[in-house]
Amino acid sequence: MVKNFRFLVFVVSLFIFSYANASNFQEAHKLSLSSAESKMIVDVNLTKYEPRSGTATAQLTIIPPQNLIGPNFSLNQDMMFLDFTGVSLSKVKIKANEPFSVNDLFYYADYIVEDSGNEFYFPFDSHVFQINYGVFEKVGENYEVYPVVGDCSLCHIGGYNIDVQDVSKDSGKAIFNITLSKNVPSKVLAVGISFVLLFMGSLVLIMSIRTAADNKAPEMSALGFAGGLLFAFPSIRNAIPNVPPIGVLMDYFGMFPGELFVASALCILAVCWLRRGGSFKDAKAPDVKK
C-alpha cells in the first residue's frame, strides 16, 4: 500500500513538472538575414520575468526585407529602430552601405510592469506591460515611418501564462499589451506547499499538547525536531519557483500560522522539559562496547 502511494505521488509530481515545462520546447524560427515580406519584421521573444523588480526582459530580432538588402549584406538606406517603452534599449541605428552580421539583428530590452513590485496576491497575481516600437527610414534629413510587422508568437516564460494583444492598428508601429499570470501547475504548487506548512505546524502543536498532558518529560529529540522545523519552513517556502519576498497573502494563510504553531509547540515542550526534570542523557549517543 505504501509503495503504491509513493508511486502515485511520483507520477503526479512528474506530470505537474512536465506540464509546467512542456511549453519550453518550442520550434524556433529559421535564422535569416532577410525576409520576403515588403515590411520590416521584428520578432519578440520574452526570456524572463523578475518578480522582485517587476522587470520583463525581451529579445528583439530585426529582420529587414529583401528590397532593403544591398550588396555585401548591407542596407541601401539608413534605418533606425526606436523602442518607446523599453528602459534599457531605446534607439538603434543601422547605417546604409555598411555590412551587418547576425549579431547586429539581436537586441535585448527590459520592460517595467504597471504594478512593479506588487506581488501581494501571489500566486494569483497578474501583471501588464506594453511593448511599443517602430522602425524609421531616413529620407533626406528626416526619418519617416517604415512599415513594420511585430511577431510575439514565441513569447514564453516558464511558469507563466502570457496573453498578448496586438493593438497596433494603423499606427505604423508594433504595439503589444502583454499580461503575465502564473500557470495552473505553479498555482497548485504554491498553494500545496502553503497547506503542507500549515498542516505540519498544526501536527507539531498537537504533538506538544499531548506531550504536556503526560507526566513525563519530553525527549530531547522532540525539542530538536520542533526547533529544526522553525528554521526549515522559510527555506521550504522560498523553494517555490518565482516566489516573491516573504510577506505576500499566501504567507498569512500558510507559513506564518505554521511558524506560529511550531514556535508555540517548541515553547510548550521546553517548559515541560524544564519543569519535569528533563536531562541531556537521552540526547547522548549510546556507548559502544569494545
Image (cartoon, rainbow, N blue to C red):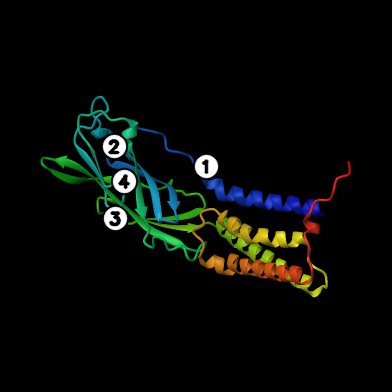
Residue pictured at 85% horizontal, 48% vertical: 287
Task: Give the residue furthest to the top.
Answer: 72
**Distance of mark 3 from mark 2, alpha carbons?**
21 Å
Can residue 175 be seen at all in this image of the molecule?
Answer: no
| Residue with the mark numbered 1 | 25
* Quarter where residue 230 is shown: bottom right
**Residue to which mark 3 is pinned:** 169
Of label 4 and label 2, which has the lower sequence position?
2
Mark 3 lies on a secondary structure that is: loop
Residue 257 at x, y percent in the picture = 61, 69
Q: Which residue is mark 2?
A: 64
Give the label, 4 or 1, closer to the camera.
1
Residue found farthest to the left: 141
Q: CA distance from mark 4 to mark 2?
A: 10 Å
Residue 127 seen in the current view:
yes
Q: How far from the left and from the top, in percent, is residue 97? A: 20, 29
Q: Secondary structure at mark 1?
A: loop
User: Would you identify the image quadrant in which residue 37 lies?
Assistant: top left
Q: Amino acid at mark 4?
A: Val
Label 4 sits on a secondary structure element that is: strand
Identity of the residue drawn at 65% across and 48% down: 14
Measured Cα–Cα span from mark 3 to mark 4? 11 Å
Q: Give the amino acid type for the residue marked by disc 2 in the picture.
A: Pro
| Residue tagged 4 | 149
Residue in the foreground of this view, choosing between 151 and 251: 251
- The kind of residue on which mark 3 rests is Lys
For disc 2, the neighbor class at 10 Å (few under 14, some 14 to 19, many from 20) is many
Is there a contact, CB below 8 Å, between mark 3 and mark 2?
no
Split into 4 quadrants, where in the image is the N terminus?
bottom right
